[in-house]
Image (cartoon, grey):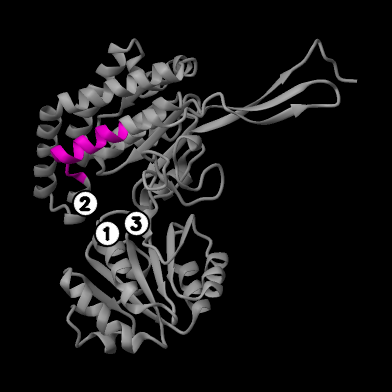
Amino acid sequence: MLEQTGKSAQAASRVLAQLSGKQKNQALTRIADLLEQNSAPILAANKIDIANAREQGTSEAMLDRLLLTQARLESIAADVRKVCLLADPVGEVIDGGVLDSGLRLERRRMPLGVVAVIYEARPNVTVDVASLCLKTGNAVILRGGKETHNTNVATVRVIQQALSECGLPAAAIQAIDDPDRALVTELLKMDRYVDILIPRGGAGLHRLCREQSTIPVITGGIGVCHIFVDESADLHKALPVIENAKVQRPGVCNAVETLLVHEKIAAEFLPLLSEKMAANGVTLHACPLSLPLLKNGAAKALAVTDVQLSDEWLSLDLNVVVVADIDSAIDHIRHYGTQHSESILTQSMSQADYFVAGIDSSAVYVNASTRFTDGGQFGLGAEVAVSTQKLHARGPMGLTALTTYKWIGIGDHTIRS
């Protein structure tokens, strides 16, 4: 059933690979314009998805991910325009030189070809991925979750209209709008047409893709993120950082899920934390050492379980664990973390350096919120995903992460001796 989708995407990718930066930016600008001009039908479709999700008992965190407002849609369109301002990486010469043989060799960036992205209740992903793939000359096949079905259909219709108006193949950006899960399994086997697969969802989706895909997979986006409050930390400056990391937008992958506190400051710091979190409606899930220090505090405190330490809350819930020292904090992160984003709050540069060297995550912060792990915040433009693996791409994936390279050899009828 999906074979024609794959064939069309592959054919479209060959057209995109030949486009100039000006042509791609013209199409992106038209996409942004049409998204704003067609906000009414897109938002109407989103209301249907929200209503269906509420009826099915979807969590508030997931509803927040799913929700589109006029302001959010305008922000999405603005992000598309920002992508226009970014340098086009396609054709960039990474390095090169002249060999002893006289052959001039260059390593030049090129599009990946066809990118497939499977994602859940994030309608902004549809536009983010489409714009980044178009800018890098890649065709894309999108498979959103059933929660975003109506929103995605309306959004992709607008995007394809913009492509057609600019003389580009509509098949450059396609969506699988049938919610049948069997189509995901079929997509995972389309290595003849798809060059790379990016799942953006829960652990189950990532596991399915790693185990069943015949296409190279880039996994990421699951964020069991930690902040370690070192014994030297400025406790009053630490609280706003923790508040930002947990409260600003709790339903995203770079929100902090577990706070690690050095045992030497726990008695002083945890009551302050409880008061700050209570003001934000955060429930604390405490380890045996921290629970006695929190149970009479302002915030609701419950005993934490091992399962909770291993998973994302994506809500106004925060795990609190007291650790003996920085090595214990690092060991905890290595055991429970997902190699997404970790932070240390400290006034000791030696401790900061030790933490950064000991943490094997895609982003590590010193005295800063984990919420910065984002393509826009990193200056990459809208991101296609946050990769937590080590090969090809790591961390927020911007434009260059959607390219590969090829070697170009230029000679003067040069032969090998």
Span shown in magenta? 66-80
Which residue is identified by label 3? 371
Look at 36% across and 24% down and name the residue there: 2
Residue 24 placement (x, y as % from top left): 39, 20
Look at 46% across and 30% down and name the residue there: 87
What amino acid is found at the position of numbered circle 3 in the picture? Answer: Arg
The 10 Å Cα crowd at callout 2, few under 14, some 14 to 19, many 20 or more, is many
Say if residue 289 shows up in the picture: no
Which residue is identified by label 1? 314
Which one is in front in this view, the residue at disc 3 or the one at disc 1?
3
As drawn, 122 above or below 257: above
Residue 154 placement (x, y as % from top left): 19, 27
The quadrant where residue 152 appears: top left
Prevailing secondary structure class for the magenta stretch in the rendered image: helix
Q: Find the distance from the CA under tag 1 to the CA under tag 2.
A: 8 Å
The 10 Å Cα crowd at callout 3, few under 14, some 14 to 19, many 20 or more, is many
> Which quarter of the image is occupied by the C terminus?
top right
Pick the residue in front: 414 or 2: 414
Nearer the N terminus, badge 3 or badge 1?
Answer: 1
Numbered disc 3: secondary structure = helix
The 10 Å Cα crowd at callout 1, few under 14, some 14 to 19, many 20 or more, is many
Which residue is identified by label 2? 62
306 inside magenta stretch: no
